[in-house]
Image (spheres, rainbow, N blue to C red):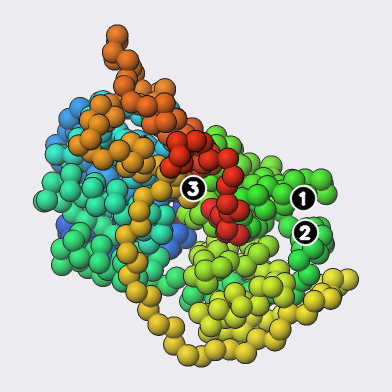
Amino acid sequence: MGFTSLALSAPILKAVQEQGYDTPSPIQAKAIPAILEGQDVMAAAQTGTGKTAGFTLPILERLSNGPRVKNNHVRALILTPTRELAAQVHENVHNYSRYLNLNSAVVFGGVKINPQMVKLSRGVDVLVATPGRLMDLYNQNAVKFSQLEVLVLDEADRMLDMGFIRDIRKILDLLPKNRQNLLFSATFSNEIRELAKGLVNNPVEISVSTANSTATTIEQFIYPADKRQKAPMLVKLIKDGDWRQVLVFSRTKHGANRLAFYLNNEGITAAPIHGNKSQGARTKALADFKSGQVRVLVATDIAARGIDIPQLPQVVNFEIPHVSEDYVHRIGRTGRAGEVGKAISLVCADEAAELFGIERLIQTVLPRFELEGYKPTNALPESVLDTRPIKAKKPKKPKKPRTGHADGQRSGDNARGHKPAGKNKRHFGPRNDDAKKPQGDKPKGTGQSRANANAGSGNSGNSANRTRSNKPNATGKPQQNRKPRPANANRG
Ligand code: AMP
């Protein structure tokens, strides 16, 4: 079956053809007709399945037949968890709509808000947004939703993991009731089903293969390793295998920095990508990696989520993840679109419990190999496959919002420095350096709240953390002695 059988108009088909796609992927073949019929859709699909075109093409078809967008209005809204994914989805929208009289924009935190406000002022047919920045823009009257026809929640599971549920619920309350809803998620946990109840109406449910079932195209194995030997082992693997493009997962941001530094010293070009990096640095690292200027991208789980690098040949788990499901997401970065990929994990004795958890989840004992010259002195215990079924997790209680998102973005709440809505309305006005300050009317509010706002308009949860640690304690004095941070404090 070709794209021409999908009832898409000539300008869209032309753009698709220019991308070099001949046949719709399974998700596209199922989602496009349902969305064109105007139905709500709930789809289980990961990045790499072609899901972006699966929702974008029919949305463009629908919008190309409707009314013109009014100033500051939006006709289709695509919410994504990370800036990288937002940029990537927007690039797709831009490419697929190049022969249509429709415009699109992308908005996310960590960059200036003013250019985004200017772009929105003329109205946008398709807006791709991360939830925190969208709420900021809404609170500044830069975006209106009364003309909205379609909502997409992309990677909904990751949005919940990243603590966006409050923002999402707020955004849903602002949208017109009569709209088409499309929900895409790699997994369908109880939490996602709970969210879906209040979102989609009588949806068409679509499921396509996830990384779990792509095992035939992903070769997975482990090298038992001593912790201190992992970095030289990685160098040996890259050099001996002459790997030109490898994504390496680190559990922590500092670990990612250290490893990239080490690799560069060993003559292997490497760049770290994580939530403490500015948006500019993240975009550059990804672009350099895609263009081949950088051979190794060292990423944390959250930063890597949604990164689209077609035909990535190697993925290395420098440390295996604490959360077994993250392993499945990680290895989903390789072996996509029918390509054979390698997912290699360097596992030390301390990580045995995590390894057994992953093997239980995927119901496979990962093959082990010894890397020549690197036999570990601290032996990794043998695996015994646990075949007991894994109980479904209980839905989590909503968490208290934190001052910074794991990847450095802020939610609308956080942007207001946790001030309750009714208590200090002034706080809703322009509040960072990017926003225009009213003439002759100094913004009120404390230095603390401004510090919070600036932390968010900058790059990271790191500055937000600093702000929090300087808060006066109960005695009114700034807190000097901080408790040691938990081992996973740098995650993301
Ligand atoms: P996505 O899952 O949307 O992130 O897409 C993954 C990759 O598949 C992207 O690089 C797309 O450009 C590519 N892609 C999407 N649809 C097709 C198709 N029908 N044929 C070939 N490649 C595709």
Query: What residue type is disc 3 on?
Result: Asp
Element type at mark 2: helix
Of callouts 1 and 2, the N-terminal one: 2
Q: Quadrant of ligand 1?
A: bottom left
Judge whether 466 appears above or below 51 on screen: above
Furthest toward the right, the residue is 373
Residue at image location 60% in from the left, 53% down from the top: 484
Element type at mark 3: loop
Q: Are marks 1 and 2 in contact (CB under 8 Å)?
A: yes
Furthest toward the left, the residue is 178
The residue where tag 1 is placed is: 263
Horizontal side, residue 171 vs residue 214: left or right? left
Packing grade of label 1 (10 A; few <14, some 14-19, many >=20) is: many
Q: Position of residue 450 (x, y in %)?
A: 40, 28
Of callouts 1 and 3, the N-terminal one: 1
Packing grade of label 3 (10 A; few <14, some 14-19, many >=20) is: many
Residue at image location 71% in from the left, 69% down from the top: 346
Residue at image location 13% in from the left, 46% down from the top: 176
Q: Which label sits on residue 231?
A: 2
Q: Is residue 413 visible?
A: yes
Q: Position of residue 326 (x, y in %)?
A: 52, 66
Query: What residue type is disc 2 on?
Result: Ala
The residue where tag 3 is placed is: 407
Q: Which label sits on residue 320?
A: none
Q: Position of residue 324 (x, y in %)?
A: 52, 72
Element type at mark 1: helix
Query: What residue type is disc 1 on?
Result: Leu
Residue at image location 59% in from the left, 45% down from the top: 481
Of callouts 2 and 3, the N-terminal one: 2
Q: Is residue 91 visible?
A: no
User: Depth check: 292 or 343 in front?
Assistant: 343
Horizontal side, residue 14 vs residue 8: left or right? right
